Image (spheres, rainbow, N blue to C red):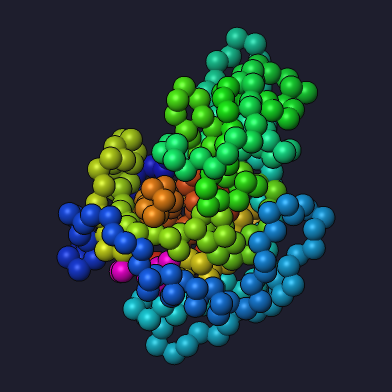
């Protein structure tokens, strides 16, 4: 869902932050080190549980208070006070597409079902060199008029061959090869997320970033995502570290925070390019929420403060 063009961020982009002509770089060791340090500093971060269910126990320490702030915290020193208390968020399994009445045409997001999980298309195509081995074939026999009982193992809205993706857990990410092209499909649902590291590091591997760019919200609204403006990756070190150490929160329609899209927040669109050639799209909301934009799940890392505000303004 796209926002209305209101409450736009105000402020110039500093020359030290933006490098319009930047080319992809080697992995930034300091980003990785700082991110790891921030993740270790979080209180009792739980291990990632990719096959958790609503009945699974909340990770230990989920209700503990967050660490205290250090005096003089600024955007430059990477200090951040997460929301209190820390509570693990259960991401519901991806919902089956609703079947409208006969005669009603509707666009259906690409998906397939494998090992009981629904994987949905991210819109990102990859080089076939990243394919790590065939795991299944899917039928492509599901459309908007299909009945619930047809959503079984191997069902999909697009026919093709399913492959593992090198470097990614199969419970989170697979690739569908159809028509000679390989597209990433992710399954974010049916898992517990307590900190940003549980999603952005354990699943998406942002620690392997080699470059970063943003697309203005105006260009994004016009589907002109090719208008990229590169940012010096080193300037994002505090942001990435804070992202990994921040609490995850439910900002869906049924959550206690309300629907993130219902507030009319201004948005920014930041992309982290990884060493394997993939990218991690991040949608930033002006209230300090950061959402993985390759999934419809409205679970966000909550990281308001000067570190977030500096990057948000730079991406405006």
Q: Where is residue 165 in the image (x, y as percent from the top left)?
A: 53, 44
Is any atom of residue 302 visible in this view?
Answer: yes
Q: Is residue 112 left or right of residue 278?
A: right
In the picture, the quarter occupied by the C terminus is bottom left
Q: Is residue 223 left or right of residue 242?
A: left
- Residue drawn at x 24%, y 51% as measured from the top left: 229
Name above or below for residue 83 compared with residue 278: below
Q: Report the front residue among 56 and 139.
A: 139
Occupied quadrant, residue 142: top right
Occupied quadrant, residue 90: bottom right
- Residue drawn at x 63%, y 64% as measured from the top left: 194
Any magenta on residue 255?
Answer: no
Segment colored magenta: 234-240
Name above or below for residue 276 compared with residue 107: below
Q: Report the front residue among 30 and 104.
A: 30
Is any atom of residue 253 visible in this view?
Answer: no
């Amino acid at each position: 869902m796209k926002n209305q063009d209101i409450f736009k961020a105000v402020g110039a982009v500093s020359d030290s932050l933006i490098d319009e002509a930047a080319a992809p770089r080697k992995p930034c060791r300091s980003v990785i080190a700082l991110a790891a340090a921030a993740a270790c500093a979080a209180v009792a971060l739980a291990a990632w549980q990719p096959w958790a269910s609503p009945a699974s126990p909340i990770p230990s320490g989920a209700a503990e208070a967050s660490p205290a702030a250090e005096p003089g915290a600024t955007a430059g020193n990477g200090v951040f006070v997460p929301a209190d208390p820390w509570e693990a968020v259960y991401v519901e399994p991806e919902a089956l597409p609703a079947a409208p009445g006969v005669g009603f045409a509707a666009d259906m997001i690409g998906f397939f079902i494998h090992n009981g999980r629904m994987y949905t298309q991210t819109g990102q195509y990859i080089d076939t060199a990243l394919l790590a081995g065939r795991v299944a074939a899917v039928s492509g026999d599901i459309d908007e008029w299909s009945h619930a009982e047809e959503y079984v193992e191997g069902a999909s809205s697009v026919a093709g061959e399913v492959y593992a993706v090198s470097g990614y857990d199969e419970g989170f990410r697979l690739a569908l090869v159809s028509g000679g092209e390989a597209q990433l499909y992710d399954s974010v649902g049916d898992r517990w997320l307590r900190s940003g590291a549980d999603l952005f590091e354990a699943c998406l591997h942002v620690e392997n970033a080699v470059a970063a760019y943003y697309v203005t919200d105006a260009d994004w609204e016009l589907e002109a995502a090719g208008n990229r403006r590169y940012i010096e990756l080193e300037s994002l070190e505090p942001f990435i570290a804070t992202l990994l150490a921040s609490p995850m929160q439910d900002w869906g329609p049924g959550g206690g925070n309300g629907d993130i899209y219902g507030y009319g927040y201004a948005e920014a669109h930041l992309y982290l390019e990884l060493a394997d050639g993939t990218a991690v799209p991040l949608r930033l909301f002006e209230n300090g929420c950061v959402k993985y934009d390759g999934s419809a799940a409205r679970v966000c890392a909550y990281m308001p403060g000067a570190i977030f505000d500096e990057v948000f303004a730079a991406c405006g």
